[in-house]
Image (cartoon, helix red, strand yellow):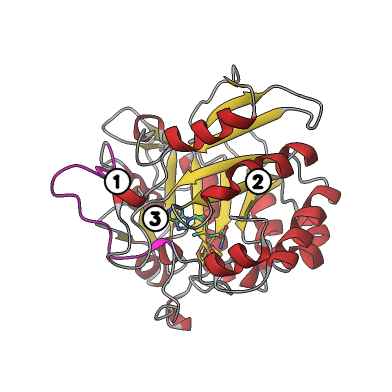
Amino acid sequence: MTAGLRTPLMLADAHGRVATDLRVSLTDRCNLRCTYCMPAEGLQWFPGEDVLTDAELGRLLRVGVELLGITKIRFTGGEPLLRRSLEHIVADAKSLRTRTGGTPELSLTSNGIGLDKRVSALAAAGLDRVNISLDSLDPQRYAAIARRDRLDAVLAGLAAAEAAGLLPVKVNSVIMRDANEIDVVPLAEFCLERGYQLRYIEQMPLGPRHQWDRSKMVTQAEILARLGERFELRPATEPRGAAPAELWRVAPDATQPGGLLGVIPSVTAPFCGACDRTRVTADGQLRTCLFSRTETDLRTPLREGATDAELAELWAGAQSLKAAAHGIGEPGFVPPSRTMSAIGG
Ligand code: SAM
Ligand code: SF4
């Protein structure tokens, strides 16, 4: 153990939760402008010198895995494929050893653009799984939501992930009223046919300012009602654990092989009580929740010579103060000042 650490630390909080799943953002930049995430004109990107270097990131990942009990790392952004050194970052993370002597489970949340060209190298570097965002199979509706005409590139990325054996391929779809409610069933059919696991996500107030309107959010109940008109659905018996998705098993029929569909009801049925996550932004700020209104600066102490043990203590201390729940819908709820792409979804 690193000198100076009293006992093995863990990322425990006052509400009985222990974080073992790290979401790390590799960049705040993106090549899409999804309406629920970013304004059309983009955002003021972080200055280059604020973004953690590969070496700084590698050190934080090592502290998280070796000193704090992290067992899963998800790389996100912005668009993590825009980080040219992603293969190197993945290989570095895969060389770490968890407290039980295993390797950390590594996954990527991506819009899929350009994944076809990099997925073999990423899999060889140690990437285990991918979640690809896909909100419509209709090129025009896809382009209206992403504000870029890139559906073909996303589909190529999905097929390549499957071919590279990053299974099960997971697909994320944010469903919005008057935008892609009509895609709920076609997206399910597409994913069931290919064995992809689709998760519908309720839109959260993490996009451009003043854009979110609870009455316009498509709820889990509405999504299930649409699915119920087409499929025979039963709650899945698979344990949910700390996973945010409520899973439903679709019975096979003459046109599709059956499988699992999930809904992430972040707003109407929050899963905060089982949350096992901790987050680091691309500019080195620790956040204990997507909706945190406070952050803990890890980058400055990292650059000013803090030891691994000091960084671990700082991280564990901040995590211990994690709020019990995000509080969307409660009186006085205020969304965080950072939007989704600057946090890392
Ligand atoms: N660019 C990558 C992507 O789109 O998958 C990774 C970053 S993105 C911020 C991560 C996930 O957050 C995506 O699945 C995206 O659909 C979701 N997301 C973004 N803004 C959201 C919002 N306001 N509510 C719910 N989900 C959102
Ligand atoms: Fe980019 Fe992902 Fe945000 Fe879409 S959801 S704008 S792909 S970061």
Callout 2: SS: helix
Residue 189, how many percent across, how many down?
71, 40
Magenta-span inclusion, residue 333:
yes
Name which residue lies at 74% across and 63% down.
Answer: 115
Q: Which portion, as a residue range, is magenta?
A: 325-340
Which one is in front, 144 or 318? 144
306 relative to 65, above or below:
below
Q: Label 3 amino acid?
A: Leu
Q: CA distance from mark 1 to mark 2?
A: 42 Å
Label 1 with label 2: CB-CB less than 8 Å: no
Which of the two labelled residues, at mark 3 and mark 1, occupies the earlier sequence position?
3
Determine the main secondary structure of the stretch shown in magenta.
Answer: loop
- Mark 1 within 8 Å of ligand 1, using the beta carbon: no
Q: Is residue 181 left or right of residue 260?
A: left
Instruction: Report the residue marked by disc 2.
Output: 187
Q: Is residue 308 left or right of residue 121?
A: left
Which one is in front, 49 or 307? 49
283 relative to 220, above or below:
below
Residue 233, how many percent across, how many down?
60, 23
Quadrant for residue 7, please give it.
top left
Q: CA distance from mark 3 to mark 1?
A: 10 Å
Quadrant for residue 340, please give it.
bottom left
Q: Label 2 amino acid?
A: Leu
